[in-house]
Image (cartoon, rainbow, N blue to C red):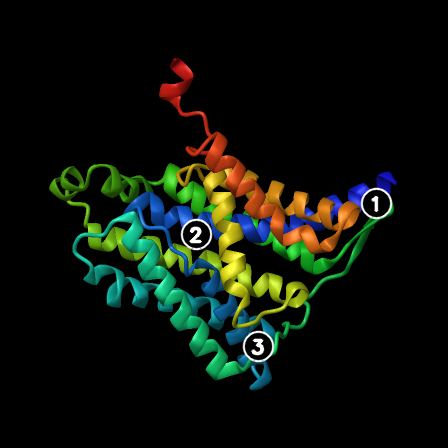
């Protein structure tokens, strides 16, 4: 019984690491532009299907993954330049409608290019491990490792580097940021590039287990959004914890209740958080002092 619990926990953590990466990408944009990017999940689908296409064309898996991730990062920058930057008075509502349109357009392009069938990349190099009766697939370790390296790198970039702090300053004090020489245009481009990178990495590492399809990105992105909401759309750390918790809860529900309820967990949590604590689970300093 306890072994089953540990097995479900391991599976949930690996799945949750994908949600956490998507949440990191969402917060990277929101913390700079206050834009809710509904197309975040499409970056994952696009990278997974793009890598599959390259592998089928004869490119080695490792190279295909790198090319797909970089290409999707460029696509994210192009979306920012061609769509987002064109709107003069961006509000959160306009950003949701706008990025929903981008999401739908990307879905249509993926369906046209690669068809309706869901497919998965070959498993990455590595061996499965067995720990105290719990079997962990090597691909699940890749998923967790991607969160540590990419998610952790983004967190350190925003919190510890001068340029990362400057990006956030653009959202909080855009005029002051401009006065001290911080370019809002560059900040916006960097935010979308980071979001594209995070989404693409999440898509390629999860593809061997959870497959890639033209329609899978929206649901994936919404689950990443739930994790980001747990962090109040501002805290990378809380969003990562939220993503991992969401993955574990889904795994427990699928294992102990019914797999049919799995996808409903995220939206139940979203409704609960929006009703009880719409600012997320983060206790900000001002609130703590009170």
Residue lying furthest bottom:
57
Q: Which residue is mark 2?
A: 25
Q: Secondary structure at mark 3?
A: helix
Q: Position of residue 107 (x, y in %)?
A: 45, 72
**Residue labelled with disc 3:** 52
Please rate how many residues cluster around mark 1, counting C-alpha atoms within 10 Å: few if below 14, some from 14 to 19, many from 20.
some
Q: CA distance from mark 3 to mark 1?
A: 33 Å
Quarter that holds the N terminus: top right
Quadrant where the C terminus is found in the figure: top left
Q: Residue at x 23, y 52 (%)?
A: 90
Please state the horizontal and vertical placement of residue 181, each as a whole percent of the image.
15, 45
* Labelled disc at residue 164: none
Q: Earlier in the sequence, mark 2 or mark 3?
A: 2
- Of circles 3 and 1, the one toward us is 1
Residue under pointer 1: 4
The residue shown at (41%, 55%) is 195
């Amino acid at each position: 019984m306890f072994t089953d619990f540990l097995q479900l926990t391991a599976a949930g953590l690996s799945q949750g690491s994908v949600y956490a990466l998507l949440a990191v990408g969402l917060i990277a944009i929101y913390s700079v532009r206050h834009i809710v990017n509904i197309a975040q999940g499409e970056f994952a689908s696009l990278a997974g299907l793009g890598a599959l296409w390259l592998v089928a064309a004869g490119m080695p898996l490792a190279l295909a993954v790198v090319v797909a991730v970089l290409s999707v990062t460029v696509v994210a920058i192009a979306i920012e330049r061609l769509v987002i930057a064109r709107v003069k008075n961006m509000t959160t509502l306009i950003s949701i409608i706008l990025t929903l349109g981008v999401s739908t357009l990307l879905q249509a392009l993926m369906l046209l290019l690669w068809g309706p069938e869901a497919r998965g990349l070959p498993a990455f190099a590595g061996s499965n491990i067995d720990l105290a009766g719990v079997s962990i697939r090597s691909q699940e370790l890749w998923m967790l490792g991607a969160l540590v390296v990419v998610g952790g790198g983004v967190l350190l970039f925003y919190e510890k580097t001068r340029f990362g702090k400057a990006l956030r300053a653009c959202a909080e004090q855009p005029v002051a940021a401009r006065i001290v020489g911080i370019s809002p245009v560059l900040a916006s481009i960097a935010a979308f590039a980071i979001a594209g990178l995070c989404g693409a990495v999440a898509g390629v590492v999860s593809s061997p287990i959870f497959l890639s399809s033209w329609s899978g990105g929206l649901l994936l992105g919404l689950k990443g959004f739930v994790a980001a909401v747990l962090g109040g759309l501002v805290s990378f750390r809380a969003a990562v914890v939220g993503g991992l918790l969401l993955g574990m809860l889904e795994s427990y529900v699928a294992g102990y209740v019914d797999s049919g309820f799995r996808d409903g967990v995220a939206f139940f949590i979203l409704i609960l958080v929006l009703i009880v604590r719409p600012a997320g689970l983060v206790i900000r300093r001002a609130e703590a002092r009170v």
